Amino acid sequence: MRLELKTGRALLVALCAALACAGPPARAQAAGREPRARKVGEYVNQFTTCNAGAYLDHFAIELQNDPDASGHVVIYGPGGPDGRFAQRAIDATKGYLVSTRGVEESRVAALYGGPFKSMQEVSTELWLVPRGAEPPPRSKYRPDTKVEGKYAEFESWDGVGVGEFEGWANSTEVAVVGLSDLMRRREKSLAYVVAYHGAESAPGAWRRLAEREAGLLRENGVAAGRVKVLFGGYAEEAKVGLWILPPDAPPPVKERRERRPERSVQVASLGNYQLKYADGERWAFKGLADVLKADGQLTGCLVIRLAPAEVEDADPEAPADPGEPPDLVQLPEKWKAELKKNGVGEHRLIVMVVPPRAGQWGGEIETWVVPPGAPLPDPPAVDEAGGEEEENPKEF
C-alpha cells in the first residue's frame, strides 16, 4: 500500500514537473501571445528631417535592436494619378531608412494603404513585425469625397528655393493632390484656384501663386479646362484658396483687378546660391515677364551685381563646381530675346550694372517694375541705407 502511494506520488511529481516545463508556452498560446506586429510610430503630414526623420530614426533603432524582425511602412493619403504620388511617398520614406539609416532593404516592406480620413493629409504608420508574425492590419478610412465648396485655404509664399529632399512633399502639395483625386471621382466638377495678394507681396505675386497650384493640378491629371484661376483681392497675408464646385455653380468669389504700383517696386532678388542651384534665373525671368505682359504700361528693370573680382579669381586650382550660375554678362541679351518671344518689346527692359555689395561673394540679380513717370530704382542707395534690404519684404 505504501509502495503504491510512493509510486503514485512519484508519478504525480513527474507529471507536475512536465506540466511546469510545458506550461508557459501552452498558456501563452492559449492566451494568444504568439508573435504579433507592433506599431512603433505614426505621424501625419510630416515632411522634413526634423519631424519625419525623428520617427524614422527611432524606427531604425527598433529594427537594429531586433535583428530577426522586419519593418513595415504603411502610407495612407492621396494616391495621385496611377498612384504616382503614393509611390513617391513610399520611395522617399523607404529610401531614408535604407540610404540614410543603413537598414537592409530586404528588411523593409513599404506599401500604400489607400486614402486617409482627410483628403488633405498623409499618414505614415511604422510597424515592427517579429519573425513568424502576420503583417500589420490595414485601416479602412472613409474620407469625405462629397465635399463641395471651399476645399482648402492656406497662406502661400512667392519665392524660389531648394527642396530638402527630392521626392518628399509638403502639406500644400498633399492638399492639391487630394483635390485632384476628388476631381477624378467627380468628372464634371470644376476646380477654382483663388489667390490673394498680401500686403507685402511683389507685383504679380497672386498670379504666380495661383499658377503654381493650378499647374500642380494639371500635372496630376486634371484637364486644363476644368481648372479656373481667379484673383480674390487683397489680404494681410498672401494666400490661396481651393474650391470644388459643380459646372453650373457661380464662381466662388467676384474677380478683382490688381492695382498698378505707384513707384518702382522690386519683384525679386536672387543671390549666387539661388541662381546656381535653384534655377532661380528662370523663375525670376518668368515672374518679370508675367508682370510686363499683364500691364503694358510697366517697364522692367534688371539690376546686375557681378561677382567681386577677388571671388572670381579665388583658388583657380579648386575643382570645378558641378552647379554653374548663369553668365550675368550675357543675361540681358538673353532676356530681351525671350521677352520678345513673349510679346514684350526689348525696349521695355532697362539693364543696370552696379557695384558688388560689401561682403558679396557671388553674382546677384534684382528685378524691378517701373510705372509710368516713376524714377528708376537706385540700388546703391538702398545698399547704403543699412538694414533696409533685410526688411524689404519683396526680396526672396
Image: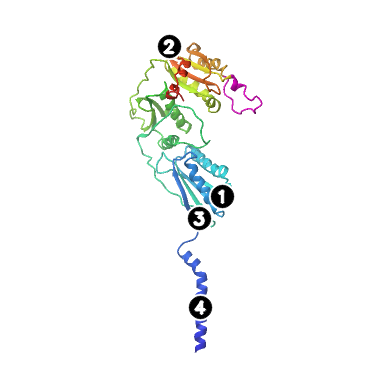
Q: Residue at x 55, y 48 (%)?
A: 108
| First reached walking from the N terminus: tag 3 or tag 4 | 4
Residue tagged 1: 107
Q: Does residue 248 appear to the left or right of 303 in the view shown?
A: left
| First reached walking from the N terminus: tag 1 or tag 2 | 1
Residue tagged 2: 375
What is the spatial separation of the Cα atoms under label 1 and label 3, in whole angstroms? 15 Å
Residue tagged 3: 134
| First reached walking from the N terminus: tag 2 or tag 3 | 3
- At mark 4, the secondary structure is helix
What is the spatial separation of the Cα atoms under label 4 and label 2, in whole angstroms? 106 Å
* Mark in the foreground, 1 or 4: 4
User: Magenta part mainly helix, strand or loop?
Assistant: loop
Residue 104 picture location, percent across and down: 58, 48
- At mark 2, the secondary structure is loop
* Visible residue check, residue 193: no
Q: Amino acid at mark 3?
A: Glu
Task: Determine if the magenta segment contains residue 293.
Answer: no
As drawn, the residue found furthest toward the right would be: 317
Residue tagged 4: 13
